[in-house]
Amino acid sequence: MTIRPATRDDAEAIWRIFHEVVAGGDTYTFLPDTPREQAVDYFLGPGIASWVIEDEGRVIGMYKLIPNHGGLGSHVANASFMVDPSAHGKGAGRAMGDHCLDQARQAGYEAMQFNFVVSTNTAAVALWQKLGFEIVGTLPKAYRHRQLGYVDAYVMHRFL
Amino acid sequence: MTIRPATRDDAEAIWRIFHEVVAGGDTYTFLPDTPREQAVDYFLGPGIASWVIEDEGRVIGMYKLIPNHGGLGSHVANASFMVDPSAHGKGAGRAMGDHCLDQARQAGYEAMQFNFVVSTNTAAVALWQKLGFEIVGTLPKAYRHRQLGYVDAYVMHRFL
């Protein structure tokens, strides 16, 4: 697997993966019918640094890295990850997580925060804990899960 | 004191108060030199519901009420408040807080979350606790306070 900066040429792959991921209604707040333009902008919009991960020449996931807040909070990074559901189990999430932490350090960030990790997304919670993140907040019933109804979301954090 | 919906005619008062508040570098992540356009947009931009509080005909504060997330997280509201530093102690924050909770209930929100309450802003923390909010998360060293350096920020929450 290879990770490289995303470009406009990745828009179709990003849209395909985004659409597959949000269709589940179990990890992101985006509605299943989120339009293509919004999906592509989320990863390729102005000022957004993003990367894709390829497996045998095919894009199977992407992530973005941005400041979590501006100004006096801009030393804390935020990142979002998506992996093609059909490519789960290959370690793409882990590889992108490691890559993202390196990129964030290089960019001068001092910490990374995820604002909204759905508590029932146990694979994601476990991955971030393995990568050194801690749960620093619990948002009660903050997510309307497609199958489970209202579930908590976590704020996760680590210093870099 | 009277609270009424904000209009474009309030832009000058909103800018004046915003500028005074962020000059302190102790409550918001906005830089002290945040430009007027960004300040006014923050409260009067498209899709943002906002209100001002008047004391003897003069605007002394404002707040906005928005969804904290879109889609599957849109049942949780977010709000931001600013009070003219020269008008502190009149109860404007408390009055706007009560008003905001009512407006959020009327709009159908089920909870309200503040994503970033600077921990050393003890007046704000105490006010929100008085209004039923709890600290549900602590973001370590998330704020570069002008006088104190790195300080924690809180995530605060209440159901409606």
Image (tube, coloured by chain):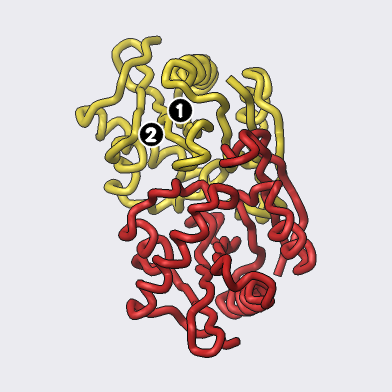
Chain colours: A yellow, B red
Which residue appears at 37% of the width and 11% of the height? A2
Q: Which residue does the numbered mark 1 point to in the structure image?
A: A83
Q: Amino acid at mark 1?
A: Val
Which residue appears at 39% of the width and 38% of the height? A18
- Is B144 or A24 nearer to us in this picture? B144
Image-based side of B147 in relation to B13, left or right: right
Q: Amino acid at mark 2?
A: Ile
Vertical order, B56 against A20 (above or below) = below
- Is A31 or A89 nearer to us in this picture? A31
Element type at marker 1? strand
Q: Position of residue B144 (x, y in %)?
A: 57, 37
Q: Are marks 2 and 1 on the same chain?
A: yes
Q: Position of residue A94 (x, y in %)?
A: 54, 17
User: Which class describes the residues within 10 Å of circle 1: few (<14), some (14-19), or many (20+)?
Assistant: many
Q: Which residue does the numbered mark 2 point to in the structure image?
A: A17
> Which image quarter holds the C terminus of chain A?
top right
